[in-house]
Image (tube, rainbow, N blue to C red):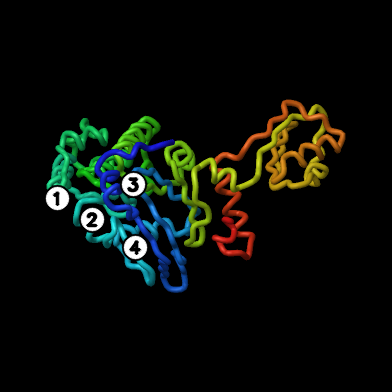
Amino acid sequence: MTIPTTGTAATDQGANPSPVVSFRQVDKSYGVVRAVADLNLELHAGHTVALLGPNGAGKSSTLDLLLGLRSPDSGTVSLFGTTPQRAIEQGRVGAMLQSGGLMEGVKVRELVTLARDLHPRGHPVDQILATAGITDIADRMVDKLSGGQEQRVRFALATAGANDLIVLDEPTTGMDVSARQAFWGAMRRQAQEGRTVLFATHYLEEADEIADRVIVLHRGRVLADGTAAEIKARAGARRISFDLDGPVDRTALHGLPSLTSLEVSGRTVRIQSQDADATVHAVYGLGLYPRHLEVSGLGLEQAFLALTSASDQSPATAEEAAR
């Protein structure tokens, strides 16, 4: 997906080629746990970037460092060429985080109005409500909202002003399908206006569909970085599926070359292979005659699992595993 480089953030990038976000050899530990390890990373204007990783990969710590909520043990984090704190004071950053509750005892409109008034480049309140899809609950008390409604209010607070960077941590948790679709429609419009959108998610189909760049963190390091298609290709494996007319000999199938996984359901066989050509050739070599044979690339979820699993099984560092 190509994002047009128009709008405030793109104009700034033209005047100043510095990245929107820069991590330089950043380390962060909590006791003996090294949450972020020598992290080097840059984000540029107008991109929509998905941050993926298994639990404990360092995603939340990375976002905390980016937003100045925590300080690195070593290395530097900068936003728009300055400190995270200064960039936030300038109204250039909006964030939607999982942690922290919403103010109670106020109506949705009152809370959104407060966020707008505190922002140096605030939008009209009705525009904020409409963009977040919460006009219909504007007069409801904040502590009477459902989980999905709370998420949309958090989104409204994150976009209450003309931010150049929007940071989202699991933004669609608790939203139903229609709310998720509306949310990502709003995010696409933000990116089309030249803003940078960074989101962490467990919904890998969202990353596959929405992001023009995917970053996979593992053990506090960048394991893979590229488009969704490049991440899938890097995983290497391909999916093979076919049906057999006769009984399925699992032992024989387990002996196929380049096999990384095998699933048998009735007479349907599903395989992941590092060399699909060799595997299919060997299937015929067993005297089998597969019907409805299909060979396809991995989806982003399967590629993600393959990459992180390979890294866990390897003594190499995450950067070495990514190469």
Count of numbered badges drawn on the protein: 4
Give the amino acid at mark 4. Answer: Val
The first of marks 2 and 4 along the sequence is 4
Residue 212, given in percent of the width and then of the height, sits at 44, 41
Label at residue 88: 2
Residue depth check, mark 3 versus mark 2: number of the one nearer the observer: 3
Q: Is residue 53 above or below residue 162?
A: below
Tell me how far mark 2 sits from mark 1, CA to CA.
Answer: 11 Å
Q: Tell me if residue 42 can be seen.
A: yes
Residue drawn at the location 57% of the way across and 56% of the way down:
322
Task: Classify mark 4: residues with Cα within 10 Å, few (<14), some (14-19) or many (20+).
Answer: many
Characterize the local packing of mark 3: few (<14), some (14-19) or many (20 or more) Cα atoms within 10 angstroms: many
Name the amino acid type tagged 3.
Ala
Q: Which residue is mark 3?
A: 45
Q: Nearer the viewer, mark 1 or mark 3?
A: 3
Helix, strand or loop under label 1:
helix
Disc number placed over residue 77 in the picture, else none: 4
Q: Are marks 1 and 3 in contact (CB under 8 Å)?
A: no
Q: Name the quadrant of the C terminus.
A: bottom right
Say whether residue 83 is left or right of residue 254.
left
Callout 2 amino acid: Ile
Name which residue type carries label 1: Leu
Distance between the Cα atoms at labels 1 and 3? 24 Å
Which residue in the structure is indicated by mark 1? Answer: 118
Give me the C-alpha separation between circle 2 and circle 4.
13 Å
Indicate the quadrant containing the N terminus: top left, top right, bottom left or bottom right: top left
Quick one: label 1 or label 3, which is nearer the N terminus?
3
Real-space Cα distance between discs 4 and 3? Answer: 17 Å
Percent across and percent down for residue 229 are 54, 40
| Image position, residue 266 (x, y; %) | 73, 32
